[in-house]
Amino acid sequence: MSYFLQGILSFTAASAFGIVFNAPKNSLFYCGLVGMTGWLIYSFVDQLTSDPVKSSFAGAFTVAFVAHLMAKRFKMPMIIFSVAGIIPLVPGGVAYNAMRHIVENDYGLAIEFASLALMISGAIAIGLVFAEIITKLLLRTIKKPKLKP
């Protein structure tokens, strides 16, 4: 699938989840931008590495970083942008496959899918936290007043 189509679909999904989560109307477009940016970075890194864990980390890091910038720009809580933006990265298909194999009594594959879903979820959480810490350190460094000798 082309990056353009992936961008449109992830923009729509993130904006729609912004509506579901009662985000302010004037922030829905930017929620979509955050989700689209995270998904496009995820797709690009996945194409380079073929590792969904690394791709999810990169996508989540990007979502949190862009959400932080949007929150500063529009003076809104960061969670408005990050929750709607992270939705395209959630490993729902992998978790579904894990549950499907449990129901079919194929526990070997179920454990494989469940562990992958767990690793992807952990990578998303770590990506969000790392972006938050790095952004705060950068902003603190930029805002720090210079002392005169």
Image: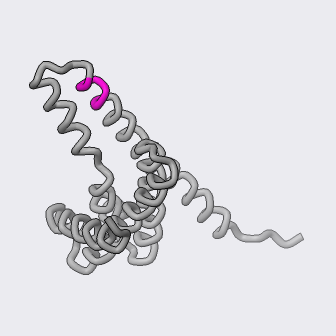
Question: Is 133 part of what is drawn in magenta?
Answer: no
How is the protein colored in the picture? one colour
Q: Residue at x 55, y 60 (%)?
A: 135
Residue stretch rendered in magenta on the structure: 109-114
Q: Is residue 113 magenta?
A: yes
Side (left or right) of 135 relative to 36: right
Q: Closest to the observer: 91 or 15?
A: 91
Q: Position of residue 118 (x, y in %)?
A: 34, 33
Which SS does the magenta portion mostly show?
helix
Residue that sits furthest to the right in the current view: 149
**Placement of 69 over or under 21, stated as above or below:** below
Relative to 16, does residue 125 appear above or below in the rendering?
Answer: above
Position of residue 49 measured from the top left corner of the image (x, y, whole percent): 50, 48
Residue at horizontal 25%, vertical 25%?
A: 109
Does residue 97 lie above or below 77 as drawn?
A: above
The image quadrant that residue 40 belongs to is bottom left
Q: Residue at x 25, y 74 (%)?
A: 28
Q: Which quadrant is home to the N terminus?
A: bottom left
Looking at the image, the residue that sits furthest to the left is 103
Q: Position of residue 107 (x, y in %)?
A: 21, 19
**Residue at 42%, 53% in the rendered image:** 60
For residue 42, what is the image quadrant?
bottom left
Q: Nearer the viewer, residue 122 or 69?
A: 122
Image quarter where the C terminus lies is: bottom right
Image coordinates for residue 15, horizontal then vertical, percent: 23, 70
Closer to the camera in the image, 101 or 15: 101
Q: How many marks overall?
A: 0
Residue ranking furthest to the front: 1
